[in-house]
C-alpha cells in the first residue's frame, strides 16, 4: 500500500497534538472525577443530553480534550462532511477494531467538541488515562474548525459538501471553507472524495509532506451519486452551465485523480471495490446504496492507517497484532459493520419491524427513497425544524417524492408536519393522517396495521424523539444520547 504523496517527517510530539506542550490547569487532577459525576447525575435525572457533561468540563478544564487525545500513539482520525459522517465514522472504527486496534470514538453522533469530551469521560480512568491506540471522531463541519484549533488530526476523511442547513452555514462554498481548515491542519494523511469538486480541491491546502489519498466511483456509477452541482444542474437546466463555470468541470477533476479505493458495483447488500488494480466483492450488512460509497471512503482512510502501523514511530506502541493486514482483511472488516443508530437501524416492536432512516438534506432524502422500495411497508415521515435539524426546511421542495405515490404515506408528524403533508400533496402522494404530536403519531402508526413492516424517515431531533418513544415500548439499544 503506497501513499500518494511524500510523508511528512514524524514529529517528536504526540501525533494527535499541535506539536506544543499543553499546560494543565491546577485543577486538572479532578477533571475526570467531576466529569464522571456530572455525567452520572445527568443520566440519572434524564436531563441535559449527551453533550452536557462535556460542556461543564470545557468550562473548568479547557485543555482536557487536547491532553487526553495526545496520549494516542496513532493520533486522531477526523471524519467530516455534509452527508454520511455518523455511519462512516462507525465503519472506520469498526474496521480498525476488527484489525485488532483499541479505538476510541464518539458513537452517539454528538458531533460537537463537547460531545467528544463527553464521550471521553466514559472511557478515561480516574487518573485521566485513555486506553486506546487511535481515536475516530465525527465532527460537525463548523465544530471541526474548533476541534483542529486544539488537536491536529493525524488523518482526515472529508466526505462531501451539500446544501444542508443553509441557515447555519450559509452557502455551500462556506461549508467547503470550513472543511479546508481540517485539511490544512492534518499532519499525516488527508482522504478526499474525488467526485465532489469542492472536496477534491482541498488537496491544494494540504500542507507539504502530508499525504493525499482519494476515494471515488467508476464511471457508470456517477449517476447514482450526483454531487451537489450535478443535482442542482439537473433540477435547474438553465443554471447548469453557470454552475459548471463557477465550480470547474466536476467530471474533469474526478477523472484526473487516482482513487485509492473506488466503488465499482452496487447491489442489494453487496458491493465491489477496486483497490490497486484488483476487484474485491463483498456482502454488507449496511442499509442503503449510499452507504456503499461511504464504505469506499472508510476503506481509503483505514488503508492509510494500516500503512502507518509498521512505521518506526508506531511499532511497539499499539495494542494491535502487528501483522500487515491485507486488502482481503479490510474487505472482511467492511462486511462486519452494522448500521449506526437511526441510520437504517431496525427495531422490533412487539413483532413489528420498524426501520429508522435519518434524512437531513435533499441528497440524503433522495438516496434513501431510491434505496428502499416502499412496497410491502407502511411509511411515516417526521420533520422537525429545531437547531440541530436546520430551521430552513425549504430543502424539502428539492426532494422527489413521486416514488411514494403507489403506497402513500401513512402518517406525517413533527413540528413541520403540515408543511411536509403539503409537499407530498404537490407530488400527488396520498397521506393517511397528519399529527404533529410525535408520540401520539408513532402509536397510531404502529397500531394501524400490526405486524406489517414500518419505515420511518426522520430529521435528526425527530429521530431522537421517535427512538426515545420506541424505547418505552420496546427494547432499543442505548446509544448514549439521553432523553431528548
Image: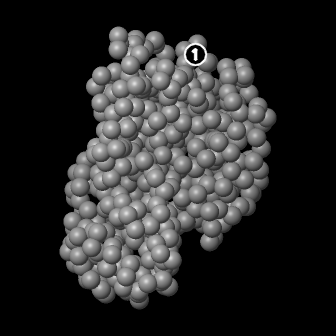
The reply, left or right, for residue 360 in relation to residue 417 is: right
Above or below, 484 against 321 in this view is below
- Front residue of 122/392: it is 122
Q: Which residue is disc 1 drawn over?
A: 11
Q: Residue at x 29, y 75 (%)?
A: 441
- Front residue of 236/316: it is 316
The reply, left or right, for residue 350 in relation to residue 163 is: right
Dot 1 alpha-carbon crowd within 10 angstroms: few under 14, some 14 to 19, many 20 or more: few
Place of residue 148 in the rendered image (x, y in percent of width and height, measured from the top left) = 41, 29
Q: Residue at x 58, y 62 (%)?
A: 286
Above or below, 353 against 214 in this view is below
Q: Residue at x 46, y 12 (%)?
A: 21
Can the viewer see residue 150?
no
Q: Residue at x 65, y 42 (%)?
A: 97
**In which quadrant is the N terminus drawn?**
top right
Place of residue 252 in the rendered image (x, y in percent of width and height, measured from the top left) = 52, 52
Place of residue 101 in the rendered image (x, y in percent of width and height, measured from the top left) = 66, 36
Chosen colour scheme:
one colour
Above or below, 338 against 182 in this view is below
Place of residue 271 in the rendered image (x, y in percent of width and height, measured from the top left) = 66, 63
Disc 1 is placed on an element classified as loop
Can the viewer see residue 468?
yes
Above or below, 69 against 110 in this view is above
Give the number of callouts. 1
Q: Could you say which quadrant of the image residue 45 lies in?
A: top left
Amino acid at each position: 500500500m503506497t501513499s500518494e504523496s511524500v510523508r511528512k517527517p514524524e514529529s517528536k510530539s504526540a501525533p494527535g497534538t499541535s506539536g506544543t506542550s499543553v499546560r494543565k490547569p491546577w485543577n486538572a487532577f479532578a477533571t475526570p472525577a467531576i466529569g464522571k459525576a456530572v455525567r452520572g447525575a445527568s443520566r440519572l435525572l434524564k436531563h441535559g443530553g449527551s453533550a452536557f457533561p462535556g460542556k461543564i468540563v470545557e468550562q473548568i478544564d479547557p485543555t482536557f480534550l487536547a491532553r487526553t487525545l495526545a496520549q494516542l500513539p496513532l493520533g486522531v482520525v477526523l471524519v467530516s462532511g455534509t452527508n454520511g459522517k455518523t455511519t462512516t465514522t462507525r465503519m472506520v472504527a469498526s474496521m480498525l477494531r476488527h484489525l485488532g486496534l483499541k479505538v476510541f470514538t464518539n458513537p452517539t453522533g454528538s458531533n460537537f467538541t463537547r460531545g467528544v469530551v463527553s464521550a471521553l469521560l466514559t472511557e478515561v480512568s480516574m487518573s485521566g488515562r485513555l486506553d486506546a491506540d487511535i481515536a475516530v471522531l465525527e465532527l460537525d463541519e463548523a465544530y471541526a474548525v474548533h476541534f483542529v484549533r486544539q488537536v491536529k488530526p493525524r488523518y482526515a476523511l472529508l466526505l462531501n459538501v451539500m446544501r444542508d442547513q443553509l441557515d447555519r452555514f450559509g452557502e455551500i462554498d462556506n461549508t467547503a471553507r470550513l472543511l479546508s481548515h481540517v485539511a490544512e491542519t492534518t499532519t499525516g494523511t488527508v482522504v478526499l472524495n474525488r467526485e465532489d469538486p469542492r472536496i477534491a480541491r482541498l488537496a491544494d491546502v494540504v500542507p507539504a509532506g502530508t499525504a493525499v489519498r482519494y476515494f471515488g466511483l467508476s464511471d457508470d456509477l456517477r449517476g447514482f451519486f450526483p454531487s451537489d452541482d450535478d443535482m442542482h444542474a439537473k433540477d435547474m437546466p438553465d443554471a447548469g452551465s453557470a454552475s459548471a463555470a463557477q465550480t470547474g468541470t466536476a467530471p474533469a477533476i474526478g477523472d484526473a485523480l487516482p482513487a485509492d479505493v473506488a466503488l465499482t458495483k452496487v447491489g442489494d447488500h453487496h458491493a465491489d471495490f477496486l483497490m490497486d488494480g484488483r476487484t474485491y466483492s463483498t456482502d454488507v450488512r449496511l442499509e442503503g446504496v449510499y452507504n456503499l460509497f461511504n464504505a469506499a471512503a472508510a476503506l481509503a482512510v483505514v488503508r492509510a492507517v494500516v500503512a502507518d502501523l509498521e512505521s518506526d514511530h508506531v511499532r511497539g506502541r499499539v495494542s494491535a497484532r502487528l501483522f500487515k493486514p491485507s486488502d482481503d482483511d479490510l474487505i472482511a472488516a467492511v462486511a462486519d459493520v452494522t448500521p449506526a443508530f437511526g441510520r437504517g437501524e431496525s427495531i422490533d416492536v412487539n413483532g413489528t419491524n420498524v426501520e429508522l432512516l435519518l434524512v437531513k438534506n435533499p441528497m440524503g432524502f433522495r438516496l434513501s427513497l431510491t434505496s428502499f422500495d416502499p412496497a410491502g411497508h407502511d411509511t411515516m415521515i417526521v420533520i422537525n425544524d429545531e437547531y440541530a435539524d436546520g430551521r430552513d426546511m425549504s430543502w424539502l421542495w428539492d426532494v422527489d417524492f413521486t416514488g411514494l405515490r403507489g403506497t402513500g404515506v401513512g402518517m406525517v408528524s413533527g413540528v413541520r408536519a403540515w408543511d411536509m403533508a403539503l409537499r407530498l400533496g404537490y407530488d400527488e402522494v396520498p397521506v393517511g393522517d397528519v399529527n404533529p404530536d410525535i408520540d401520539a403519531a408513532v402509536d397510531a402508526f404502529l397500531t394501524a396495521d400490526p405486524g406489517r413492516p414500518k419505515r420511518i424517515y426522520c430529521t435528526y431531533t425527530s429521530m431522537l424523539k421517535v427512538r426515545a418513544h420506541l424505547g418505552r415500548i420496546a427494547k432499543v439499544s442505548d446509544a448514549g444520547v439521553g432523553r431528548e
